[in-house]
Image (tube, grey):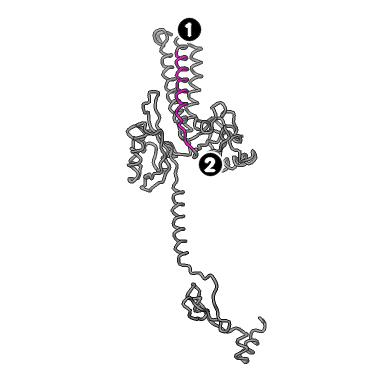
Amino acid sequence: MNKKNGQNGHKPVEEGRLDSRKFLEAELRFRAIFEQSPYGIVIIDTGGKIIEFNKTAHSDLGYSREEFAELHVSDIDPFQSPEEIKNSMKEVLRKGEAAFEVRHRSKDGTMRDVHVITRVVNFCGRRVFQAIWHDITERKQTDEILSRYREHLEDLVRARTAELAAVNERLQKDMARRKRVEDKLRESEDRFRRIFEDGPLGIVTFSPNFRILNTNTAMYEMLGYTGQELSGCSLEDVTYSEDREKTIELSRRLLGGDIPLFQLEKRCIKKNGDILWTSMTTTALRNQDGEVLYGLCMIEDISNRKLAEQERERLIQELQVAMASIKTLKGLLPTCAWCRKVRDDDGYWKKVETYIEEHSNASFTHGICPECLQKNDPEAYKEYVEKNKEWI
């Protein structure tokens, strides 16, 4: 057995350490993206219970992680009854996704305006709501919790490594324990990968030299690329020429530590050359020494909103032109009690139809009413009555 497995039987243990480290690194990578997102991200079951969330989600509302873990959607949405919340969740389940604005109540009772984008996803074998919400009342930094969890996981790894190296005769037991740890790490890595890949917003990570490292499905579908085509491209390659300078300048200040994050409406270039309007929120992920690991962008397609704003401006301009061309009559009109002529502002007496045509867009046609026809031409009036007696 020693010859097969190596001297003193250490080779399987070393290989196990490498496998565990790979799972741990993958889990840390996807947890970092999840935990340090500038948006609040929560996983909610179909009964409205919050089962997974990031720091932004609870800290923006003033709750601790432990307090927030006990909350129901109805605890932070005081403007809907439990029955209304239940009906809303059924509607999202039916459609598969939704975007809306809502007001949340924080722990101290203050109200915060929040923009929510939610999608129904498969989470560990069951259907849940993945919601990404953006606090549009104020912003808070989100990287504090990452350090605490990273140190906790490092302690677990050191303890596990010491256990496995302590006694060789406990190899079988330790291997079984390692297998359970690997399964948990694999499950965690898959969970955070699904959050990254299936999120309703585009997600991009980029290196300190502005090269794209990873994109999720929503991002490359927005731009019409595949993930392989975008990997390695520069941010400038997919940014509209007039927006490149501002995008790179803000990114450089972010990675240099001048600002914690920035939000920018910018135009992207799709693969087919079309323009895509986006809202981009970007933060920098750093290690414990403050060194930049990579930048993280959360990108939302706002093309429809931009088109609606342009259409609104066009309609307003058309309405202003139309209003400017309308003539109106108002006030008292001096008229002659005998001939019914109207006196204009210059003191001249004019026929009613002449005055109205000059002061409005109306025009006149002429005919003879039955009363005048009877008075001035009785014979013609009799013929008129005879022809139209069924209508009189």
Left or right position of 305 against 73: left
Q: Which residue sits at x=63%, y=85%?
A: 371
Disc 2 marks a residue whose amino acid type is: Glu
Predominant secondary structure in magenta?
Answer: helix
- The label shown at residue 97 is 2
Between 140 and 100, the one lying in front of the other is: 140
Residue located 41% across and 14% down the image: 14
Query: Circle 1 sits on which residue?
Result: 169
User: Which stretch is magenta?
Assistant: 138-161
Give the Cα distance between marks 1 and 2. 54 Å
Amino acid type at image mark 1? Glu
Pinpoint residue 374: horizontal percent, then vertical percent. 63, 88
Magenta span has 145?
Answer: yes
Residue occupying the point 44% across, 25% down = 28
Is 257 positioned to the left or the right of 177 in the image? left
Residue 60 picture location, percent across and down: 51, 33
